Amino acid sequence: MQLFDKLKRAADEEWREYTEHPFTEGMADGSLPEAAFRDYLVQDYLFLIEFARAYALAIYKSPDLAGMRDAAAGLSAIIDVEMDLHVKLCAGWGLSPRDLEQTPAAPETLAYTRYVLETGLRGDLLDLKVALAPCIIGYAEIANRLATYPGALDSRNPYRAWINEYAGDAYQDIADKARRQLNDLATRYLTTAREPELQRIFSEATRLEADFWEMGWKLGSGAV
């Protein structure tokens, strides 16, 4: 069994709470309040800035040039592609990139991004990639599922651009590559003694991902 599949199976409850959160279901049928999606998207923009730093750290942590190139490509994909989608969507609400960058980060954003960075700083590349995996691979899985829902990709669904982006071939390839990289790193670094710690990292990162959806859900619905 591949490393990601082992980690996901052991964190089955956390994974379901993350990938099947009501926030994601609301994107599929268009019922998600616009305010919830807007607040999530702004915080996700701030999250991506820190995620880019994590990829920069992955360049430093990579043991060879091939790994450095892979991390550099991931960094470029975040800064030049994924963040651009957020800017375009937010422009529809009159929000400029400067507005996004000056928005205070929510506690959930800070908790998640700091966890990923601290995990990478104190560990090796495998630790960092395991902490990143729920986001990278999870978004691909979520969008793939949402894209199968009737009407999810209909022009009337305001969230079709998000679903299209992450269900598209380009992002699915990124997620598949992340899976393969985990296996390659496991061959290099994994020992039986490390498995419980890697599982803890994965489970915690997955829980923090679910908290991120919950943040947007509550902010947009006026629950907090």
Image (cartoon, rainbow, N blue to C red):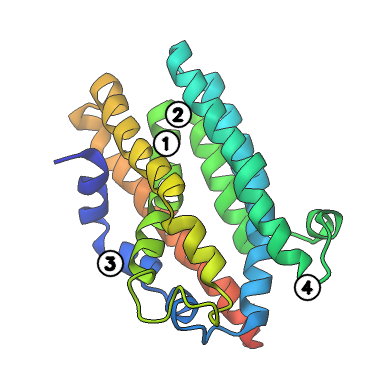
**Mark 3: few, some, or many residues within 10 Å (few <14, many ≥20)?**
few
- Taking depth in this image into account, of 70 and 89 the one nearest to the observer is 89
Residue occupied by mark 2 = 123
Give the CA separation, mark 1 to mark 4. 34 Å
**Mark 2: few, some, or many residues within 10 Å (few <14, many ≥20)?**
few
Query: Picture coordinates of residue 92 (x, y %)?
Result: 76, 70
- Taking depth in this image into account, of 220 and 128 the one nearest to the observer is 220
Q: Which mark is residue 129?
A: 1
Amino acid found under the numbered disc labelled 1: Lys
Earlier in the chain: of badge 2 and badge 3, it is 3
Q: Quadrant of residue 206?
A: bottom left
Residue occupied by mark 4 = 93
> Mark 3 or mark 4, which is nearer to you?
4
Earlier in the chain: of badge 1 and badge 4, it is 4
For the C terminus, the quadrant is bottom right
Query: For this view, does 139 lie left or right of residue 30?
Result: left
> Mark 1 or mark 4, which is nearer to you?
4
Residue occupied by mark 3 = 13
**Mark 1: few, some, or many residues within 10 Å (few <14, many ≥20)?**
many
Q: Is residue 59 above or below residue 119?
A: above
**Quick check: can you spot residue 132?**
yes
Which residue is depicted at the point 35% across and 77% down? 149
**Mark 4: few, some, or many residues within 10 Å (few <14, many ≥20)?**
few
Which residue is depicted at the point 53% across and 46% down? 115
Query: For this view, does 70 lie left or right of residue 148?
Result: right
Amino acid found under the numbered disc labelled 3: Glu
Earlier in the chain: of badge 4 and badge 2, it is 4
Give the CA separation, mark 3 to mark 4. 36 Å
